[in-house]
Image (tube, rainbow, N blue to C red):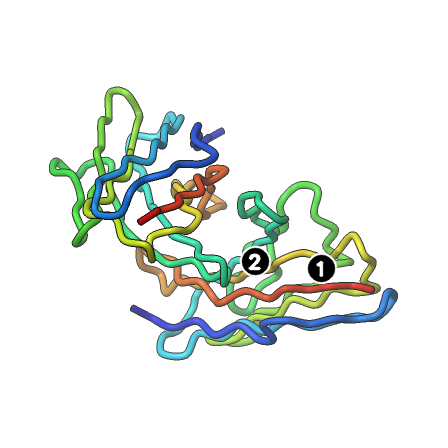
Amino acid sequence: AQKITQTQPGMFVQEKEAVTLDCTYDTSDQSYGLFWYKQPSSGEMIFLIYQGSYDEQNATEGRYSLNFQKARKSANLVISASQLGDSAMYFCAMRERSYNTDKLIFGTGTRLQVFP
Amino acid sequence: GAVVSQHPSRVICKSGTSVKIECRSLDFQATTMFWYRQFPKQSLMLMATSNEGSKATYEQGVEKDKFLINHASLTLSTLTVTSAHPEDSSFYICSARDGGLEAFFGQGTRLTVV
């Protein structure tokens, strides 16, 4: 069974500072994918960034980057230059694939609050 | 990115009635759609996976007779909560995949059963 762990229920960061949201995972698969989603208070899930297990470089998308440490099974999200609009829930997820299933498994999330 | 439209965004229904939630992929064909349930301040819990033209695969503990899922076309999946009770009140969100890597999410539906 696969598992995603987000140990930070809440994080605070000052505007314009960088913040790291932790995510560790557990899988016996050699090939897997890791995702980060943002969920504002309105509820929609916004895709932020993706890292494949075989990707040699850490993924980056604008102010988002993923600190992927495969040996430690961690895929932390780094948000640089935080903005007030970054305040939201952030979920780490892993794609679980088998002969009869292909689905996303989510962590418990981290609530990020950006203050002026 | 691709657009998934979920309707309604909010619904209030009386206990004992049924309510249908629609999930549409607007600009791509969704070979697979997923339905999630999210309780306040909790994570998304996968309820079921549906592939177009076949029966949905439900996660353990999800009552298939209570949560009816239909994926009749490549652009539409519906979730019907039958004989709703207050404990069914929750945020339901769908996602759709076109066979590629990413799953695109709808806006979610907040169901309140009174």
Q: Are marks 1 and 2 on the same chain?
A: yes
Front residue of A44/B66: it is A44
Amino acid type, callout 1? Phe
| Circle 2 chain | B
Q: For the residue carrying disc 2, how many other residues have a C-alpha within 10 Å: few (<14), some (14-19), or many (20+)?
A: many
| Circle 1 chain | B
Q: Is residue B33 left or right of residue B101?
A: right
Amino acid type, callout 2? Trp
- Give the quadrant of residue A77: top left
Q: Are marks 1 and 2 in contact (CB under 8 Å)?
A: yes
Q: Check disc 2 and report its element: helix, strand or loop.
A: strand
Percent of width and height locating residue B13? 78, 71
Which residue is outermost to the bottom?
Answer: B26
Front residue of B90/B62: it is B90
Which residue is outermost to the front?
Answer: A116
Q: Determine which residue is flagged by label 1.
A: B67
- Give the quadrant of residue B4: bottom left
Quarter of the image that includes the C terminus of chain B? bottom right
Sequence-wise first label, 1 or 2: 2
- Residue shown at the point (51%, 68%) measured from the top left: B52
Q: Is residue B27 left or right of residue B15?
A: left
Q: Determine which residue is flagged by label 2.
A: B35
Percent of width and height locating residue A96? 42, 40
Total numbered badges shown on the rendered structure: 2
Percent of width and height locating residue B16? 87, 66
